[in-house]
Image: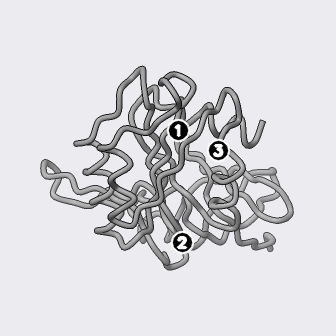
Amino acid sequence: MPESQTGRVLQFTAGVYRIHTPRGTYDCSLRGRAKRDAGERVAIGDVVTFENLPDGSGRITEVLPRLSRLSRHSLAKKREQVLAANVDQVAAVFSLHRPDPDGRLLDRLLVVAELHELPALIVANKSDLVEGGAVPAEISAYADLGYPVLRTCARTGEGLPDLQDRLAGRITVFTGPSGGGKTSILNAILP
């Protein structure tokens, strides 16, 4: 009988789920009853049970209940698309320059976080590209609404220790426009 383990889904590519456990990372597929029950909608962050098969592959047997989710609704398909499960907070990452911050997109991201009752923080990145590293008033005003606004620079390391403190022990979704520095920040924190 195959050994059963519990882990968290880290990645999904071409029908293969990468699952992290304290014992290592495993590649698994979704088959049988679990596939019918999940309807192929296992999300990044889901906690699952899986079996290690003799050929070295794995098979997800159950998707455990979600504690939280971050999702969007498709009007065309009239269903919810879960983007991430079991999330503790959302980090909206924006560049202070190149590209300039998009206040409308920031509003939309914060509304989605509020809708799902997830705390959010704003990461104002690329502070080295603006004179004096100042955060524009239209972004710093969010601090008055209760959102932490962190000024960072992935290139110089400015603000990264404070960001790391806010990430410690939490599962955080990094979101924001292309070019904002999400990958650069993550690479600076976890090279």
Mark 2, Cα crowd under 10 Å, few <14 / some 14-19 / many 20+, is: many
* Element carrying mark 2: strand
Report the colour scheme.
Answer: one colour
First in residue order: circle 1 vs circle 3:
1
- The one of 37 and 158 positioned closer to us in this rendering: 158
Q: Amino acid at mark 2?
A: Val
Q: Residue at x 39, y 34 (%)?
A: 177
Return the mark for residue 63: 2
User: Distance between the Cα atoms at labels 1 and 3?
Assistant: 37 Å
Mark 1, Cα crowd under 10 Å, few <14 / some 14-19 / many 20+, is: few
Q: Residue at x 48, y 24 (%)?
A: 130
Q: Residue at x 38, y 59 (%)?
A: 82
Q: Nearer the viewer, mark 1 or mark 3?
A: 3
What residue sits right under mark 1 in the picture?
A: 14
First in residue order: circle 2 vs circle 3:
2
* Element carrying mark 3: loop
Q: Residue at x 13, y 52 (%)?
A: 75
Q: Quadrant of residue 104?
A: top left
Q: Amino acid at mark 3?
A: Gly
Is 119 situated left or right of 54 in this image?
left
What residue sits right under mark 3 in the picture?
A: 159
Seen in the picture, residue 175 relative to 20 is either above or below; the reply is above
- The one of 17 and 153 positioned closer to us in this rendering: 153
Seen in the picture, residue 175 relative to 44 is either above or below; the reply is above
- The one of 111 and 132 positioned closer to us in this rendering: 132
Q: Quadrant of residue 79?
A: bottom left
User: Distance between the Cα atoms at labels 1 and 2?
Assistant: 19 Å
